[in-house]
């Protein structure tokens, strides 16, 4: 069961990586480091087939990936002692605004996976905006 769960997790990670890498219009930035367990990730699986990745093996795999492609690899800038200057905020926050109308919209957020699992790609059916019975009219007033 554990092996099946790992395969399914890897499959989902590969799908997410594919979506991230193929949906960019201009560029995609990706951070990668030789961390423990990298071979269990989607990138680690693609670079080394799920085998352990030492820092040297990671660099070699990335070098092969760059050859003959438009992929570029840049090292991160060296850390500095520079600190971000904070701006002191003298003004106090005002009172929260009150909405001028009730929120009647029925909206929801779902991932592609959730839509696929539910078997539908449509939004849930919305109740009618106008009440059709006296009971609904009373319920809408609240």
Image: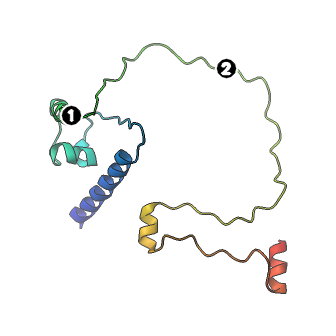
Q: Alpha carbon of mark 1 to alpha carbon of mark 2: how far? A: 41 Å
Q: Which of the two residues, 33 or 70, is positioned nearer the viewer here?
A: 70
Q: Which mark is residue 87?
A: 2
Mark 1 Cα-neighbour bin, 10 Å: few <14, some 14–19, many ≥20: some
Residue 101 spot, x, y in % from top left = 83, 59
The image shows residue 71 at horizontal and vertical percentages of: 27, 33
Quadrant of residue 125 within the rendered picture: bottom right
Foreground residue among 3 and 63: 63
Going from N to C along the chain, the mark reached first, 1 or 2, is 1
The C terminus lies in which quarter of the figure? bottom right
Q: Please tell me whether mark 1 sits on a helix, a strand or a loop.
A: helix
- Residue at image point 19% right, 42% down: 47
125 versus 88 height, above or below: below
Q: Are marks 1 and 2 in contact (CB under 8 Å)?
A: no
Residue 84 visible to an observer of this rendering:
yes
* Residue sitting nearer the eye, 43 or 72: 72
104 in relation to 61, above or below = below
Q: Which residue is located at x 24 percent, y 60 percent?
A: 7
Q: Residue at x 35, y 45 (%)?
A: 21
Looking at the image, is 126 positioned above or below residue 33?
below
Q: Position of residue 54 (x, y in %)?
A: 17, 34
- Horizontal arrangement in the rendering, residue 90 relative to residue 76 (left or right): right
Q: Secondary structure at mark 2?
A: loop
**Given this view, does label 1 or label 2 mark the residue nearer the observer?**
1
Marker disc for residue 62: 1
The residue that appears at 82% across and 85% down in the rendered structure is: 135
The single residue placed furthest to the top in the displayed view is 81
Q: How is the image coloured?
A: rainbow
Placement of the N terminus among the 4 image quadrants: bottom left
Figure quadrant of residue 60: top left
Camera sees residue 41: no
């Amino acid at each position: 069961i554990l092996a099946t769960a790992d395969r399914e997790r890897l499959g989902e990670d590969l799908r997410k990586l594919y979506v991230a890498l193929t949906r960019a219009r201009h560029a995609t930035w990706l951070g990668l480091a030789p961390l423990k367990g990298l071979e269990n990730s989607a990138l680690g699986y693609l670079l080394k087939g799920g085998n352990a990745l030492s820092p040297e093996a990671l660099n070699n795999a990335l070098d092969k990936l760059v050859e003959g492609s438009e992929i570029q690899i840049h090292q991160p800038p060296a850390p500095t002692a520079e600190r971000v200057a904070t701006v002191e905020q003298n003004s106090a926050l005002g009172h929260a605004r009150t909405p001028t109308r009730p929120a009647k919209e029925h909206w929801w957020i779902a991932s592609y996976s959730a839509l696929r699992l539910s078997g539908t790609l449509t939004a849930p059916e919305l109740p009618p905006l106008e009440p059709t019975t006296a009971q609904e009219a009373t319920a809408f007033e609240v």
